[in-house]
Image (cartoon, rainbow, N blue to C red):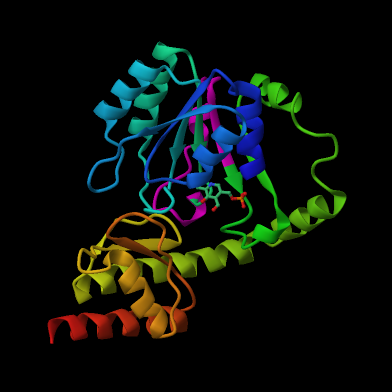
Amino acid sequence: SNEVIQQLLQTFAGPGRLAIGFEPSYSMHGLISRGTGTGWISGPRKGDFTIDVDAAEAAIAAHRPDVVFITTPNNPTGTAVDAETVLALYEAAQAAKPSLVIVDEAYVEFSHRPSLLPLIEGRPNLVVSRTMSKAFGAAGLRLGYLAAHPAVVDAVQLVRLPYHLSAVTQATALAALEHTDTLLGYVEQLKAERDRLVAELRAIGYEVTESDANFVQFGRFTGEGGAHAVWQRILDRGVLVRDNGVPGWLRVTAGTPEENDAFLDAVRALKKEQSS
Ligand SMILES: Cc1ncc(COP(=O)(O)O)c(C=O)c1O
């Protein structure tokens, strides 16, 4: 879906135009914007990592961006965005320009909430982008897709390279789709493990951001060395989590029950060391 995002920016943004996202969020939105010559505006989030609707509307009205990114569930925080927020930002974006609103649902299959796909009905400037990289466990396949008004899809065809999706990719994706029930069955198990990680981390005494994704953001690490020092100490215990640059926080991906137990044992031991 990185390619889908790049094609959308090539089509609707570019030099002299602007895109906005609400950070911390998926860093490639800003990078692909810059790579297509599009100016990038970093919009705000609240302390709990939800989108601050008033501040977001004000930023859209002030900058009049050509593209608005809304990532739900958000990477790296796991935060879901409700339909009301998306609709409010869509209205603000239409009043300001009108601009294209890209709802990035890369992690939607892991969410407690349903997809926002139905919102594209009657909203010609709303695009939903999705991927087979996460829930289908097929990142190596490189298959992303979008849903939008036919006029948007037609416009994107202008920048899409001929034969950009190989026959092998298409055949593999169709084979994966035939096993949707099995593959999304694993997602259900993973969601239960994700919810267990949230509950256990809280019970141990960590702050945990609400998660609708297949990972959990936990903290807060304000001591010497900050989150990176804790990342190293968890790694010293044989568990690799992600230090994704949100000050004071780390991100753990939900794995198998055994992997999650190993992670929980590691952070439990760290907490004990701190309190002794
Ligand atoms: C929010 C979000 N969108 C899109 C992507 C792109 O994934 P892919 O290009 O594998 O579909 C990622 C990958 O990490 C992501 O986190």
Q: Residue at x 29, y 43 (%)?
A: 50
Relative placement, left or right, of 30 versus 8 is left
Where residue 269 appears, as percent x and y from the top left, is 26, 86
Segment colored magenta: 108-129
Where residue 53 appears, as percent x and y from the top left, is 28, 30
Q: How many marks?
A: 0
Relative placement, left or right, of 100 versus 7 is left
Residue that protrudes farthest toward the front in the picture: 224
Position of 88 relative to 192 (above/below): above
Q: Nearer the viewer, residue 74 or 230?
A: 230
Corner quadrant of residue 84: top left
Relative placement, left or right, of 144 versus 236 is right
Residue that protrudes farthest toward the left in the picture: 276
Q: Nearer the viewer, residue 120 or 51?
A: 51
Position of 234 relative to 242 (above/below): below
Position of 20 relative to 72 (above/below): above
Where residue 152 appears, as percent x and y from the top left, is 64, 23
Corner quadrant of residue 199: bottom left
Relative placement, left or right, of 43 versus 47 is right
Residue 39 makes an appearance in the image: yes
Residue 1 makes an appearance in the image: no
Q: Is residue 94 magenta?
A: no
Q: Residue at x 78, y 58 (%)?
A: 172
Where residue 21 appears, as percent x and y from the top left, is 42, 35
Query: Which part of the image, by quadrant, shows the C terminus?
Result: bottom left
Q: Is residue 110 magenta?
A: yes
Query: Which part of the image, by quadrant, shows the N terminus?
Result: top right
Q: Nearer the viewer, residue 2 or 111?
A: 2
Q: Residue at x 80, y 34 (%)?
A: 161
